Image (cartoon, helix red, strand yellow):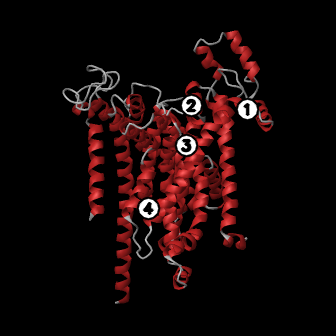
Amino acid sequence: MTFLALRLTSGDPVASLLAQGLASVEQADALRHQLGLDLPLLQQYLRFLTSLLSGDLGRSLYTGQPVTQIISEQLPYTAQLAAAGLAVALVLGLLLGLLATREDRQRSLPLASGVAGLATALPVAFTGILAILAAIAFRAAPTLLRGITLPALVLGFASSGAIARLVQAGLQETLSAPFMLAARARGIRRGPRLLWHALRPALPPVISLIAVEAAFLFGGTVVTENVFSRPGLGRLLVASILQGDYPIAQGLVVLSAVVYSATHVLADVFGLALDPRLRRSE
Amino acid sequence: MTRGAFAAAACTWLVLVVLGAIFAPLVAPSGPTQPIGAALAAPGGASPLGTDALGRDLWSRMLYGARTSLAGALLAASLAVCLGGVFGLAAAMHGGWVERAIAWGANAMLAIPGLLLALMLLAALGPGVGTIILAVGLGGAPGFARLSRSVFLAARQSDYVRAAHALGAGRAWVAFRHVLPNARTALFSLATTHVAWAFLGITTLTFLGLAGDPSLPEWGAMLNEGRLHLVDAPQLALWPGSAIALCVLSIQYLGGWFTRRVRQAEASRMESDERKNRS
């Protein structure tokens, strides 16, 4: 599907090279043949699929480097940022969710849920720029500006809102469950009661949300990398779109689709491990 | 009480933005693309918010930018709502293989994250504002189809729809005469969330520099330009950034507020109906 969407509509990528005066007509024809663009579409698609299965994503139209090499060069930066962002999102989301919940009352704490609401609504681009401005205003060390701390915080904050909301909704439900009253009657203290008895049954939906968030996180890294001028896959994707370098864009889309389905499978496995009730119902 | 105050503030802000967008040529002191003086001038004097890196008046660009961002978001959201709504209605009313086919298509599209789907379309069609609107609209359609389907299904299972069927009404008649009007409040609150979402999507894509024409006044693109002058002229990023954030927050808040009000009204109506039945 990705292949068709990109190839059918992008017209002739070699033509844009021609138009920019980067190649002569003979070179263009040779390039077309080399890239297999002169073959019928179906044949092109089959070639794309077979080379995809053998791990070959083609070559960049501009530099001629293999796409897999370009992507694997940039991958660590994005993976690092996404992992750090996810960690921040989890900690912040759980914290906000716990803070927003009060055991004895139905209504949530307005401040914590307000922050969670802000987190989902504020554009990542804006929070990123606010973070940079704050760092400048407080004369933070330049290492902070260049390091991963700020981008991870910005990215994590954006994803924490949805997690907080789900944690809060789950807690609200479990808190009124009979086993909470039983725990209270057994004299278990408030802290452990909240953290162990109430939080654990509320977590599986959060885990499956994280799988969805992983996709969101990818979108977030695209913006965050551009705000902070960090290297990574997100900037690579935007640059390849702006240049019309379709093999790179195509490879990135394939990669993120794979990552996305993998996180979904992982999330299901984790969910089963965490909630025995799901195992029983099978 | 405070909720009402928030809603009023959100409403006021949105009305101001819409008015500013409509009457931009009358209110703006200068055109959005014509330089009026020194670059990066401080706020005050002829330009109330200062000038940008090319000496263009920031206040005028904000006003004209509201047009692009707002119209873009509304267009993209209506595309998503219309397209998604048609598919949702068809799936809910038809059932069977139509429903399965639509659900399959929507799930296939939802398997790819929204921003990525939009970026994919942009990669295929090339950068540009029109493409961005199309990409955001198409990206929102499957989600709206899925949500609206459940709304239509709920309306379809009500007694009056069954009564209409029993009276021999055709499927299309029931769909447009009974199901659609009764689903409209629920659809409206779904649509408001989509407008907020489209606003966020469009400004994000223009922020990434995918609008094509760099001279076009648009809040996301302006935020991106302001990013380069955070130290010497932070207002260049702060104004468009806060404007985007306030708009998204306001639309979302009003949508939520409206939904709550409708639910309350429905609950109290049901209560009074029950009381009437009992007496």
- Closer mark to the observer between disc 3 and disc 4: 3
In terms of depth relative to the viewer, which is nearer, A70 or B66?
A: A70
Q: Which residue is mark 4?
A: B186
Crowd rating for badge 1 (residues with CA inside 10 Å; few <14, some 14–19, many 20+): many
Crowd rating for badge 3 (residues with CA inside 10 Å; few <14, some 14–19, many 20+): many
Three-letter residue code for mark 4: Ala
Marks 2 and 4, how far apart at CA: 34 Å
Q: Which residue is mark 3?
A: A219
Tag 3's secondary structure? Answer: helix
In terms of depth relative to the viewer, which is nearer, A134 or B211?
A: A134
**Position in image of residue A38 (x %, y %):** 74, 22
Three-letter residue code for mark 3: Gly
The tag on residue B134 is none
Name the residue rendered at 65%, 12% in the picture. Answer: A23
Point out the image quarter for the N terminus of chain B: bottom left
Do marks 2 and 4 share a chain? Answer: yes
Marks 3 and 1, how far apart at CA: 22 Å
Q: Which residue is mark 2?
A: B125
Tag 2's secondary structure? Answer: helix
Image quarter of residue A47:
top right
Subunit that carries the residue with mark 2: B
